[in-house]
Image: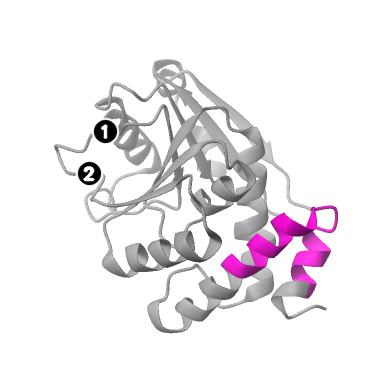
Amino acid sequence: MPTDVSSILNEVFHNLIEDKKHLLQTYLDLLFKWHKTSNIVSSSDKEYVIKREVYDSYKLTKFMRGQSYTDIGSGGGLPGIILAIFNPEKEVVLLDRKSSFIDFLELAKAELMLDNVNVVKQDFLVKDTQLMTDTVIFKNFSNKLISKMTYEEKFIYLMESTKKSKSVSKAYMLTGSPVIELSDSCISEYNIKVEKLVSPFFSSDRFIAEVNF
């Protein structure tokens, strides 16, 4: 069972060209180093993070369509930095409200020389937030304003907040199984398409929800 980043990447992304694999390793080395003091990723287990968070983010980026993206609540940069690595021709905005995340994202952008990335410190749920990209991404998004809502209430709240930005025509959410239990009215209102993201490493599946405005 591999335990170091390089070995795990070779197992998970064995067909990946070397320059992309090198960028991934550089990013993950930074991520795990910062996580020790700033808690910026979901787990300290490197194998879990790479096989669950990084791999699923990679599969999400293969599914998405758009020319410019805002990763809402980017945190440690998953999936925004993964998207930027594999799509250098596309604009990627990494948006977060926490200074510790912003500091890390700025460092990662510089270390990886990601010229297509713009890091923005902002709370997405404040009234005057205006996004300038055509597509937005949600993954593990949390905020105290929506913490006590049901899944569908959260989903609707986020979509209504997104619609306030007129440039946005599409949203993607990497999420869990509750998305397949959304009401028919919600699915119709937001023109939702759901795709199962089958993992070769875990028995539990994630889902990609595509919303068209």
Kindly indicate whether the residue at mark 2 contacts the one at mark 1 (C-beta within 8 angstroms): yes
**Amino acid identity at mark 2:** Leu
- Which residue corresponds to mark 2? 125
Q: Which percent across, then down, holds residue 189? A: 39, 17
* Mark 1: secondary structure: helix
Residue 117: in magenta span = no
Q: Give the dominant element type of the magenta stretch: helix, strand or loop.
A: helix
**Sequence-wise, which precedes: disc 1 or disc 2?**
2
Q: Which percent across, then down, holds residue 147? A: 29, 53
Disc 2 crowd rating (10 Å Cα; few below 14, some 14-19, many 20+) is some
Residue 10: in magenta span = yes
What whole-number distance in Å separates the C-alpha atoms at marks 1 and 2?
7 Å
**Amino acid identity at mark 1:** Ser
Magenta region, residue range: 7-27
Work out which quarter of the rendered image holds the C terminus and state it. top left
Q: Which mark is residue 161?
A: 1
Q: Is residue 39 above or below residue 136?
A: below
* Mark 2: secondary structure: loop
Q: Is residue 46 left or right of residue 124?
A: right
Q: Is residue 68 left or right of residue 88?
A: left
